[in-house]
Amino acid sequence: MRWKYTAGVGAVDLSELDPEQAAAVRAPRGPVCVLAGAGTGKTRTITYRIAHLVAAGQVRADQVLAVTFTARAAGELRGRLRALGLGDSASTVQARTFHAAALRQLRYFWPQVVGEVPWRMLDRKFPVVAQAANRVGLASGTESVKDLLGEIEWAKSSLVAPEDYAAAADAHRRETPFAPARVGEVYAAYESVKTTPEGLLLDFDDLLLHTAAALEDYPSVADEFRERYRCFVVDEYQDVTPLQQRVLDAWLGERDDLTVVGDANQTIYSFTGAGPGQLLDFSRRFPDATVVRLERDYRSTPQVVDLANRVIGMAQGRIAGTRLKLVGQRADGPEPEFAEYDESATEAADVARRIDDLLAGGTPAAEIAVLYRINAQSEAYEQALTERGIAYQVRGGEGFFQRTEVRQAVQELRRTTAREDLPEASTAGKKLISLVRAALAPIGLTASAPAGAQARQRWESLVALVRLTEELVEHEPGLTAAALLRELAARAEARHPPTVQGVTLASLHAAKGLEWDAVFLVGLSDGTLPISYTLNGDGSVADTAALEEERRLLYVGVTRARIHLLLSWALSRGDGDRRTRRRSRFLTGLVPDGSPASRIVTPVRPATDANRPVCRICGRALLDSEALLLRRCKNCVGQPDTELLGALQDWRREKAAELAVDPRGILGVNTLTAIAEQLPEDEAALAALGIGASKMRKYGAEVLAIIRSRRRSISH
């Protein structure tokens, strides 16, 4: 314990803190904003601040509510607070996610606010959204429902009602799965479906909405809550949504005892409704606020820190004005490396080779990560690592809860805990851990890892489930079997697997808040990072704000590395494809002249007016890639075969569902339109429309078969 009470007033040992951290800890009670760069010790700072306030007698420990955005981060906060003596019985600081805090409060206040109306948590939103889509006559395929669910979650987090959704979606330039008005109808139907004869179904956003409303509309509820909690701490404040801010405002009332911590340069979740506005405007809302900047980076070597500063140093816009310049505090390490490859498979194979070298050199597999922009990129790395016999986990849940052994394990747990002869006392707390071990033993859980790669992978999955149970029991000592099964179901839906020993594969979004000794940032080409929808067909910027968020994603990726960092890209997708890719524009000026990847592939020179392809409708020269694909100006009206276009769209949707990929990753909308307009007769004609060799091998025969079928129906 690093502090103790002395006659009601204690002191906290701040000798392990740097001057800026100590300044944040010692700031007087009231509004405090800590601008904390990556790796600067923000969690240590806020836990010491809480300990300082308690030790100085300014607030009781049980009057502090600290909130963050993930259960993992909340668990880390609780662990740090326990180490400072703030985790015992009545003197416990509440450290929870926004949703967990709201759930606890709503359960307590519901009888006062709503009365006897029963409610329960909606375990799975997917089937309810599917039901709502069917109710309004929209397709309820897996991908469509997921997209609709995402839009509903964005709207609720942004405080957008169903009747206002269409206008809000247009204003925010949302990429909607159906016409915005139709999505709004599904949203309204979803809210209606949740009212059942048995009572109300509440989703996670409803928890926040009802909690805020209870405090706003019922003075007695607000008074009781504000008497209970006097001091608030918010971590990752740049990620707060309008709905979460509404809850925080309701918690505070007219008070200002608030400490927030964040980094606008790590704002990467705008698609969920989150944004840094509240962080950037904090000192405007609270003119007397103490603002402290943490810039000493204890995570990464100076070489990694320098690259991170150069990445974010090119940022534009309002967030750039709050830029933190990190200062590396670790000993020197190797310079970040850059690598260019002819194709994606070669890139993946070489990354796997480099990982093998790191493992041979003593770097633990759990301290290595491969990070990419989109989840679909993981396949090549899963394959490359498998071929080298390197264990890995795909972070974010893609795969873990879908594995056969994991599904079987959960079924076995359900069957075991449903036994009528099972004493209730053996299904809770530490005895629950023993119960889980016993239930999984018949299906492969042994004391040590078995021989064989597949058997070992199965064993590691089962061990991971046991470890997850142990972690949950540690955080909730009275955890029951029923609560464990609910948690597993929730994590399966939320794609939040427990950690297994192995190289981590993760999207840049999923990597936020994590760190590794060695990080491989892969697939860094224009159209992937930055993602294609931020660019026009000719490569110009389509959405400046979205482009800058892509730059911040790269910054987040770079700052995940402690020592080793490789940034790589490939010029084509596969063997035989044209080398049409270009390395990410964000790497301009970053690749050292002496690097083997410093060469810039010479772009294809534009055709002269004399030999430039011309529009097949008006005869003018074609100037951009979209026009070249369609063989007409974008403003000239084409005449696609609508039945063929519909057949191609149906085929693409079914193929995407079969392969579990984004339909756009099969063939783009413009490519389908070009096919429906030009009716290519063979593979050479398809290739002229920009379909590369890899996609030709995968889809060419099927596309041509659809075209031939359409031609036959026309001729008859």
Image: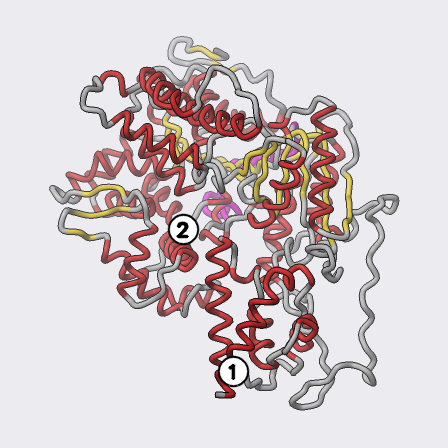
Tell me: residue 398, above or below residue 576.
above
**Label 2 vs 1, first from the N-terminus:** 2
The one nearer the camera, 511 or 676, is 676
For image coordinates 49% across by 70% down, the residue present is 649
Tell me: residue 197, above or below residue 349.
below
User: Which residue position is annotated with label 2?
Assistant: 242
Question: Which quadrant holds residue 670?
Answer: bottom right
Question: Is 363 within the magenta?
Answer: no
Left or right? Give the position of 481 relative to 715.
left
Question: Please, what is the three-letter code of the amino acid marked with disc 1?
Answer: Arg
Can residue 275 be seen? Answer: yes
Query: Which secondary structure, mark 2?
Result: helix
User: Which residue position is annotated with label 1?
Assistant: 712
Estimate how packed mark 2 is, as few (under 14), some (14 to 19) or many (20 or more) residues with alpha carbons within 10 Å: some
Residue 188 image offset from top left, x and y in percent: 28, 61
Label 2 close to label 1 by CB (< 8 Å): no
Query: Which secondary structure, mark 1?
Result: helix
Question: Please, what is the three-letter code of the amino acid marked with disc 2?
Answer: Pro
Q: What residue span does the magenta drawing correspond to? A: 279-298
Tell me: residue 425, above or below residue 585.
above
Gap in angstroms between the C-alphas marked 2 and 1? 56 Å
